[in-house]
Amino acid sequence: MPTPAERQALLFFAAVAALGLGVNAWRAARGGDAVVVGSPSDLAAQIARVDSAVASSPSRDSGRAALRRRNADKKAAKQAQAAVIQRPLVTPFPVSRSPSPVSLIDLDLASPASIESLPRIGPALAARIVANRDSFGAFGSLDGLQRVRGIGPALSKALNGLVAFSGVAQPGAPTGKDKGRRRPAVP
């Protein structure tokens, strides 16, 4: 026994079928051609109508080509801008007097790829460091670096001796204590 919802659905489909039969009978009574489902001639006529509509509309491929050109132009502009803004990525400072000097990574200028080369820093944390630096300016010190979510005293201590800071922290920029706050603390 069908449920009430199933009965309504069956009634709806029966009404649609009855309307279709009525329209077909009306066309036949007026002397027109009744639509026969699946006849090859009707199918060919429908395909011809669709093809003519497609032929008369603007080409989809030309729209795609324009989109590709626009995206290529944007990419070229971005690359040109990155080439202009490119700064030295690593500032050499000898850490020890060993025969092979280790160069420090300047976190105020370094790219995400060079920041990832530091221990315990992956791609996500490197991206957060760069985003924070772009938003709030130079870190200036390890204390300023702690304003980045994911960098605390332990990681800061591990990075000591491996990183350098060429910039000066801007006054009013958040510090490590302000990490995660969206608004300044109200006294």
Image: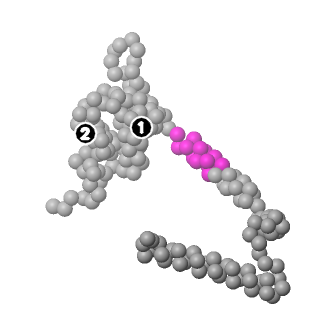
Question: Residue beneath label 2, please?
Answer: 152
Q: Is residue 108 visible?
A: no
Please tell me how many numbered marks the rendered image carries: 2
What element does badge 1 sit on? helix
Is residue 70 rendered to the left or right of residue 46? left
Residue drawn 29% across the image and 57% down it: 182
Residue count near mark 1 (Cα–Cα under 10 Å), binned few <14, some 14–19, many ≥20: few
Foreground: disc 1 or disc 2: 1
Q: Which residues are magenta?
A: 72-86
Query: Which amino acid, mark 1?
Result: Pro
Please, what is the dominant secondary structure of the magenta stretch?
Answer: helix
Say if 89 sits above or below 57 in the image: above
Residue 34 is covered by the magenta coloring: no
Is residue 68 rendered to the left or right of residue 91? right
What element does badge 2 sit on? loop
Say if 159 sits above or below 40 in the image: above
Residue drawn 68% across the image and 52% down it: 68
Q: Position of residue 165 (x, y in %)?
A: 35, 36
Query: Which amino acid, mark 2?
Result: Gly
20 or 113: which is nearer to us? 20
Question: Residue beneath label 1, please?
Answer: 123
Is residue 48 rendered to the left or right of residue 61? right
108 or 79: which is nearer to us? 79
